[in-house]
Amino acid sequence: MYKTPCSRLSGFVGVNVKQKLFQSVPRCSQTARSLIQLHRRDPSNWLTYQHLNFLKRQYVAKNSSELHQRAVPKQAPVLTLVDERDDSVERQVERIPTINPVDAVPQPEDLTSETQTGISASKPAVEDVAAQDRSHVAAVSDEAPHVHVESEEARQARLDRQWKLLKVDVSDLPDVYARLAKIKLTALVVTTAAAGFAMAPVPFDPVMFFVSSLGTGLASCAANSINQYFEVPFDSNMNRTKNRPLVRGQITPLHAVSFAVACGLPGVALLSLVVNPLTGFLGALNIFLYTCCYTPLKRLSITNTWVGAVVGAIPPVMGWTAATGCLEPGALLLGGFLYSWQFPHFNALSWNLKEDYSRGGYRMMSVTHPALCRRVALRHSLGLIALSTLAPALDLTTWTFPIISLPINLYISYLAFRFYRKGDRNNARKLFFCSLWHLPMLLLLMLTCKKSRSGGAEAAPPPAAPLAN
Amino acid sequence: MAARRTAVTWTALGRVTLPAHLHPLRLSASSSRRCSSEQAAQQEKPPKRSPHRPEPSTTHDWIGPPNPLSNLRPIVYCIPEKESELEKRLRHLRQETEDWNHSFWTKQNISFAKEKENFIISHLKSKGLTLRDEDGRRRSLNSEEMAVFYKSFLDKNRTRHANYNKEWYRRNFTITLLMARVTLNSVWMYFTERHSSKKNSSPST
């Protein structure tokens, strides 16, 4: 219960505790003395977590109330004890086969027959333990019924271990849909599409901007839902994805598909009928590429990363075509930024998931071709610099853009280079987190450096003129 | 499935000697696992199962916690009072798919863990080290050494994974189509029934 704040603030707390301890040497002289000894023995690292651990209770007691040092903490430890015991029993029951799989493997047939008989043998024991626990809890609650508080986390964990009725609760649906559509990824996709729209060399039309963003967002929701619909057993086996709504059974597969259709059809229809057919086609193509090429390819070949990069590159192109109605070099350049950006982003992300990917049967570059993975990340980070230089050449931006984007591009290239030289967890993490802010930053810089064309300036007055008349 | 899990655990904890009267059950259980859709059918008159697994309801499915071996959540499918042929087919297919998934992932996870362990031990041996260091802590290999294992595991199981994927896609599609048919059917029934009841009631008023 006190672990989180303690570990998070361990430094701060340590200082606090130290001060307080020195103030109240007589009260807790022993602890203080040992602390001082620690301090003397090795001043450089006396503030480490392990050393602070034994002080935790002291800290809690003091913080909760200076005067009732004894009264409050006495209850709390008892409760946590029960909790832990409850946990450990369950853990024993559930986890042992994974710890000791060698026992279970050699005779799968044998195992099945024994499982059934094991049930009845184990049942009384399990019930016994449960009964013990219950009595224990009862005893505790007799002592202090009002302290029966459970932290939100513990409650979630406990509920997660229970059987639940699969009822669709309407009030849960928005949250479920948001997770099914991977709302954050969709937001990123819409942002890149909006950037594509804004960068197009035509006068800005707010209605069209809104409609194309909405259409792109709906198409992205559909693609993400279909993707999750295909991946249930794989997602169940990865830590990163094990809480997705279909894995938890919060909705049925049919429900998810219906949601995807309900998003995808209007999305593509909006794009093709209201915006223009080219954009609608690109949207439909992207849903197809993502769900029917990228998703299955993940477990077939490492080319999936390149296909995935194309999928990511299409939204800004869609934004551009929504504004102009045709494919131009500028649109492809914008797509190129997204394409190149994804390699440092995804290769760094997948680097630390190698074990899960291998177990899940994903043929990712980071697992099967680690050297290539790092090389490609570096190559495309450098490519971002080249693309930035190309932007003014294609009349997309002014020459300020390559100059002011150089620092962030150099920084991501530097991190990619470090990742290339030494592929450890830390370098991969740093590169990944850098990529997260790098892209919005780059797009923002690009927008500020957008070239106001002479042609654009001439084109601007005509739409205004009819309004004036 | 929860029952299976608990039992596996207890088997792993130590071989339990069995009372004689349990042996018939043991035989029937091992044979029914291979097609547990039948087992599901038998459950309509359920023998008392593990306290963890709820009885099938008539209106809603039950979903359990993730199985520690396969990481999949077991589902107890609901059995409606007037179950149609189609609904029964769907339920059996889902149950069978669940069991098939469970056995694949159990095998997958166990063999992964086992091979990983063997890989680490053999590598440490070749370096002249023991599994545990002087303080009793487990030694581990660095990420580059482990990458060799991760790659080899993928390469070795390539066709098995591909086959699983194909089969999973097929089953997933079939289940969804069946579900759609069941839903359409029940919607159809709902409207026709209301329609006919209106017809019946309107003359009387």
Image: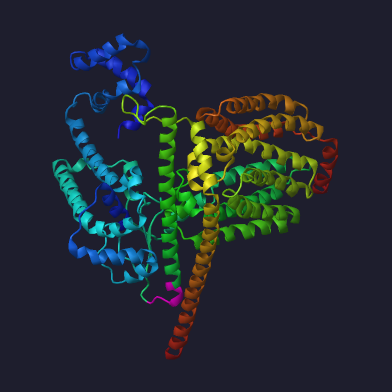
Question: Along the horizontal axis of the image, is A188 left or right of A448?
Answer: left
Looking at the picture, how far across and down is residue B115, in whole percent?
A: 43, 42
Q: Nearer the viewer, residue A274 or A218?
A: A218
Looking at the picture, how far across and down is residue B118, in whole percent?
A: 41, 39
Residue pushed farthest top? Answer: A40
Structure colour scheme: rainbow
User: Can residue A44 be seen by looking at this rendering?
Assistant: yes
Looking at the picture, how far across and down is residue A114, in whole percent?
A: 28, 57
Magenta residues (range): B82-88
Q: Note whether B82 is above or below A404 in the view shown.
A: below
Image quarter hosting the N terminus of chain A:
top left
Q: Nearer the viewer, residue A249 or A298?
A: A298
Q: Residue at x 71, y 52 (%)?
A: A282
Q: Nearer the viewer, residue B111 or B99?
A: B111
Question: Along the horizontal axis of the image, is A266 left or right of A14?
Answer: right
Q: Residue at x 37, y 52 (%)?
A: B67
**Is B84 contained in the magenta span?**
yes
User: Can residue A352 be seen by looking at this rendering?
Assistant: no
Asked where in the image residue B46 lies, by quadrant, the reply is: bottom left
Looking at the picture, how far across and down is residue A51, in whole percent?
A: 30, 20
Q: Residue at x 16, y 45 (%)?
A: A136
**Is B187 contained in the magenta span?**
no
Q: Note whether A15 is above or below B40 in the view shown.
A: above
Q: Residue at x 57, y 34 (%)?
A: A348
Question: Along the horizontal axis of the image, is A274 left or right of A453?
Answer: left
Question: Along the horizontal axis of the image, is A397 left or right of A266?
Answer: right
Residue pushed farthest bottom? Answer: B203
